[in-house]
Image (spheres, rainbow, N blue to C red):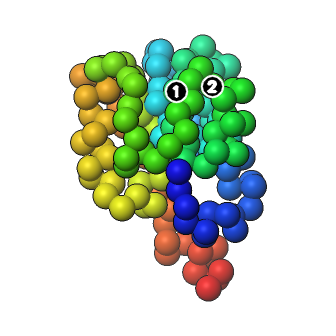
């Protein structure tokens, strides 16, 4: 579990969101997706509605508990230290929606997850633009 108090201060909307940019990039032929940092599972639920089986990983228990009601499987834990129960080449896609920038060692996480991605699989990630006006004005 993440014990960083910064995340306790985040609005609940942070965990309940659905990233429309990632949703637009989803391939309709995919059968299984791993959503790292799945939050409350809203993006995954939209994929499940399309017939895609979604597995989620979420570090924050309250969000993971919500995601469990929407996704096929949810692992509550820190992706950097969690022991993963997945099979080799299980996923067509691994999603990182605004997650990689929060990790201590994102390259290690990508290497850790590589065996679970199919040979022709895809990694989709979204990283915030720290130069965006909304970020700059918030300081």
Q: Is residue 27 left or right of residue 44?
A: left
The structure residue drawn at horizontal position 40% and vertical position 41%, both measured from the top left corner, is 82
> Nearest the camera: 77 or 72?
77
- The kind of secondary structure element at disc 1 is strand
Q: Is residue 101 visible?
A: yes
Determine which quarter of the picture holds residue 117: top left
Q: From this view, report whether residue 61 is shown above or below residue 48.
A: below
- State how far apart marks 1 and 2 are (Cα): 6 Å
> Nearest the camera: 72 or 94?
72
Other-residue count near label 2 (Cα within 10 Å), few / some / many at <14 / 14–19 / ≥20 = many
The structure residue drawn at horizontal position 31% and vertical position 58%, both measured from the top left corner, is 105
The structure residue drawn at horizontal position 55% and vertical position 18%, both measured from the top left corner, is 52
CB-based contact (under 8 Å), mark 1 and mark 2: yes
Mark 1 or 2 closer to N-term?
1
**Residue 138 x %, y %:** 65, 80
The structure residue drawn at horizontal position 69% and vertical position 36%, both measured from the top left corner, is 65
The disc label shown at residue 114, or none: none
- Residue at numbered disc 2: 71
The disc label shown at residue 55, or none: 1
Q: Is residue 25 visible?
A: no
- The kind of secondary structure element at disc 2 is loop
**Residue 127 x %, y %:** 46, 57
């Amino acid at each position: 579990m993440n014990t960083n108090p910064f995340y306790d201060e985040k609005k609940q909307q942070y965990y309940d969101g659905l990233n429309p940019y990632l949703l637009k990039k989803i391939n309709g032929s995919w059968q299984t997706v791993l959503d790292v940092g799945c939050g409350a599972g809203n993006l995954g639920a939209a994929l499940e509605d399309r017939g895609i089986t979604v597995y989620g990983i979420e570090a924050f228990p309250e969000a993971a508990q919500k995601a469990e009601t929407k996704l096929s499987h949810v692992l509550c834990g820190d992706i950097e230290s969690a022991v993963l129960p997945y099979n080799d080449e299980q996923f067509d896609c691994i999603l990182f929606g605004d997650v990689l920038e929060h990790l201590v060692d994102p390259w290690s996480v990508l290497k850790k997850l590589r065996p679970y991605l199919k040979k022709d699989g895809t990694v989709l990630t979204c990283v915030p633009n720290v130069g965006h006006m909304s970020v700059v004005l918030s300081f």
